[in-house]
Amino acid sequence: MRLPRRAFAFLAVFAAVTFPLLHPLNISDRVSPEAVKFKALIDSIPAGSVVMVSFDHEASTVAEVRPLATVLARHLFSRDVKIIGLSLFAEGTAIGNQVLSLVAEEYGKKYGQDWVFLGFRPQFQAAILGMGESITNVFPRDYYGKTTSELPLLKEVFNYSQIALVVSVADGDLGYAWVDYAYTRYHARVSAMLTAVMVASYMPLYASGQLSGLVNGLKGAADYERLLDKPGAAIRSMDAQSMAHAVILLLILGGNAAYWWGRKK
Amino acid sequence: MTRRLVFWITLSFGVFMLFQFFIPVVGGAYRKVLDWMQVIYLSSLLVGVIALGLQHLRKVSTLSSGWGYSLVTVAGLVAMPVAAFWGTGESSVFFWLFNNMQVPMQSTVFSLLAFFVASAAFRGFRARSLPAFLLLVSAAIVMLGRVPIGTKLYFDFPAWSQALLDIPSVAARRGILIGIGLGSVATSLRVILGIERGFFGRKV
C-alpha cells in the first residue's frame, strides 16, 4: 500500500508536535517588547486595586488561552490585586472559573473578598454597556448563585470607574467589543490577551493606544512566564510550536522545490 | 400595519440609542433598554434552541439520512442543561462532562487545523509570481519570528516579524477597519430610516 504524500505531511507535523512535548528541548528565546510592556502595565497597578478579567473564548482554544489566563492571574494575585472574572462566551465560563479558583488557592486568596467570578452573560454589547452603569445590575448573582451586592468586593466596585484595567482573554473579536463599548463609552482601560491568529487584527487598536496592553498568543504567555520567572505550560509548549513551524516551513520549501524542478523539466 | 409598527419601533429606538450617547439625562431609560436587549436576545436564543431540537428530533423520528448525528445533537442539547440543574461547580456532573467531553472534542477538531495547514502549505503555497513570493517570504519571517527556533537561526527574525506586523499589516488592517466603520454607519442609517427593510420579513 502506497501512502499519499499528504500522509507524510501529517506524520511530520505529528512527530514535530509530540516529540518536544515528550522530550523538552528547552530552546531559549528573546522576550517580546509587548510582553515587557504588558508586565509593566500590571506592575503599575497598585495593590488592592481591582482588575476585570473576561474569558471571551471557546473551549477549542483552551491549550493557548489557559496558559495566558493562568500567568495573568498569578501575576495579579502575587501583587495583591483583586480580580473580577466573567465570561461573554458561554464556553469560557467553566474554564475561567477553573483557572481563577486554582490560582486563588495557590496564593491563598479568599472568594468574595480577593476575587469573584460573575459567570456568563449573553448579548455582549448590552452586558459591556450595562456594566458601565452597574455591575451588580448586569450580574445580580455570581457563578455560584450568591447575591453579588452582598459580596464584600462588589460593595466597593460599582462600575468601570473603580476598575483599574479590563483584560479580555479572547480567541475572537470580543476584545474589539470591549474597546467599542467599555473604552469608548466609559473610558475604561482595556487590554487583551489573544490567540496568536487574532493578533494581526488587534494591532491597529494597540498601535493607536485604544488597547493599553496586548499579549500575543502562546509565545506572549511564554515571555510573560519568563518575565515573572514562573515557568509553566506556555514555555513547555513553545518547543512543540517551534518544531511545528519549522516542519511547515520545510514542507513549503519542499513543495516549492518540487514545483520549480517540475517546471524546469 | 405590522410593517409600519416595526418601522416606527426601529426608528425610535435607533434615534434614542444614537442621541443618548450625548444626553446623559436619559440614563434611566438607557439602562432599561440595555436590560430589554438581554431579555430579547435570550428569548431569541430560546427560539433557536427549540427550533434546533425540533429539527433534529424530526430527523431521528423519521430515521432520515444522518439521523445518528441528530441523535447525538439532541442528546447533547438535553444532557448539558439537565446536568447543570445539579450544579456547575468543579465536582459537578456538568463540569465533568464539559471538561472531559466538550473541551477535548473541540480541542481535537481545532488541532486538526495544524495538519490541514501543513498539507495545504505543502501543496498550495507556491512562489508562482512575485506577489506570491513576497507573501511566502513574509509568512516565513513571521512564523520564524514567533518561535524560539527562529531566534536561534537568525537573531533578528523577531524584529523583522514585529516590523511586518507593525507597519504593512497595521496599515492594511486600519484601511479595512475604516471601510467597515463607514459601511456600518451607512447600513445603520439605512435600517433606522427604513430604507433597508429586508429584516422586516415577509409582507403582512
Image (cartoon, helix red, strand yellow):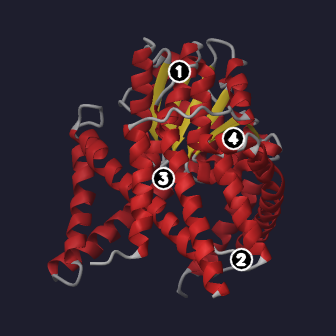
Q: Which is closer to the viewer, label 2 or label 1?
A: 1
Q: Which residue is mark 2?
A: B194
Q: Nearer the viewer, residue B115 or B5?
A: B115
- N-terminal label among 3 and 2: 3
Tell if the residue under mark 2 belongs to the same chain as the one under mark 4: no
Q: CA distance from mark 1 to mark 3?
A: 44 Å
Q: Secondary structure at mark 1?
A: loop
Q: Position of residue A176 (x, y in %)?
A: 67, 50
User: Which residue: 70% across, 66% down?
Assistant: B136
Q: Which mark is residue B39?
A: 3
- Can residue B43 be seen in this snapshot? no
Q: Chain of mark 3?
A: B
Q: Nearer the viewer, residue A153 or A99?
A: A99
Where, by quadrant of the figure, is residue B181 drawn? bottom right
Q: Secondary structure at mark 4?
A: helix
Q: Which residue is mark 4?
A: A182
Q: Chain of mark 1?
A: A
Q: CA distance from mark 4 to mark 1?
A: 32 Å
* Amino acid carrying mark 4 in the image: Ala
Neighbours of disc 2 within 10 Å: few (<14), some (14-19), many (20+): some
Q: Secondary structure at mark 2?
A: loop
Q: Is residue B143 left or right of residue B63?
A: right
* Amino acid carrying mark 3 in the image: Val
Q: Is residue A86 left or right of residue A158?
A: left
Tell if the residue under mark 2 belongs to the same chain as the one under mark 1: no
Q: Which residue is mark 1?
A: A230
Please report contact status of discs 4 and 1: CB closer than 8 Å, yes or no: no
* Amino acid carrying mark 1 in the image: Lys
